[in-house]
Amino acid sequence: MAVEDTQPLVSHLIELRKRLLNAIICVLVVFAVLVFFANDIYQLVSAPLKEQLPTGASMIATDVASPFFTPIKLTMMVSVIVSAPMILYQVWAFIAPALYQHERRLMMPLLISSSLLFYLGMAFAYFVVFPLAFGFFAQTAPAGVVIATDISSYLSFVMALFMAFGVAFEVPIAIILLCWSGVTTPEDLKRKRPYVLVGAFVVGMLLTPADIFSQTLLAIPMYILFELGMFLARFYVGKRRKPTEEEDDDEPLHS
């Protein structure tokens, strides 16, 4: 009896290992393709800052190995980001058999939307936030201070902003899931709008570097996405079904 009980667990662990290996292989393949262009990728990511630097100013490397390892590190991060749809698909493939048919129909659009929103958040940071923020920082530098940003420090700064805006743009997905699971409702969230607005600025303060400029540029889109999430949640709440209906109409492929 004990052996029979452990068989489903073992099969799930084998399936999980398979999905993890697929995700890792995907990241490594993408990295192998992009590593040749590591310096070009860094040039692309650093372009918003270099365009705002005063004439004669440039980026620097304060560590001997930074010119080599920093672009490689960035390329690995980019490989993970590019592979995000495949990683999410592996997660989906692992949990899908345990879901009801109507849950699979509802979850797939959420997985696709979450990838698109994450990329949209990163694009917003690159094309909107970076030019504004770096231009602001360059113009407010004290007289006599030469701007020479270290390439490693710059990478840490922009990746923090990329991740912050990518995660923040997932707000509609979070709102939909909370309403769909019954944790809250769009009506309850409407009554909490003032608190959400304050919370958006608090989250912006926690996720971005310590400057009010980046915090504001993150908080405002977050609140707009909160409103979008409330609007879309109505469609998912309407499709939530009772447990008795789930048992009668469909069954998951495995428990």
Image (tube, helix red, strand yellow):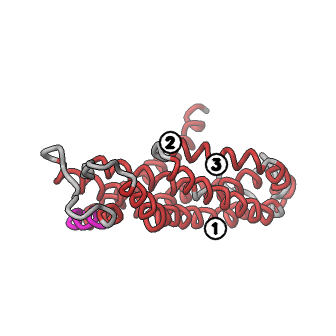
Q: Are marks 1 and 3 in contact (CB under 8 Å)?
A: no
| Residue visible at 67% across and 48% down in the picture | 255
What main secondary structure does the magenta stretch of the protein show?
helix
Q: Circle 3: is it few (<14), some (14-19), or many (20+) Cα within 10 Å?
A: many
User: Regarding mark 2 in the picture, which secondary structure is present there?
Assistant: helix
Q: From the image, state whether disc 3 or disc 2 is nearer to you.
A: 3
Q: Could you give the CA–CA distance between mark 1 and mark 2, rounded to whole angstroms?
A: 30 Å
Q: CA distance from mark 1 to mark 3?
A: 25 Å
Location of the N terminus (image quadrant): top right
Q: Residue visible at 17% across and 53% down?
A: 67
Q: Nearer the viewer, residue 164 or 72?
A: 164
How far separated are the C-alphas under marks 3 and 2?
43 Å
Nearer-N-terminus badge (1/2): 2
Please give the residue where the numbered disc 1 appears in the rendered image.
109
Callout 2 crowding tier (Cα within 10 Å): few <14, some 14–19, many ≥20 = few
Amino acid type, callout 3: Ala
> On residue 200, which mark appears?
3
Instruction: Identify the residue under disc 2.
Output: 10
Taking the image as shown, residue 89 lies to the left or right of residue 62, namely right
Span of residues in magenta: 35-44
Which of these two is toward me, 146 or 15?
146
Tag 2: residue type?
Val
Which residue: 57% across, 43% down?
Answer: 8
Q: Which mark's residue is nearer the viewer, 1 or 3?
A: 3
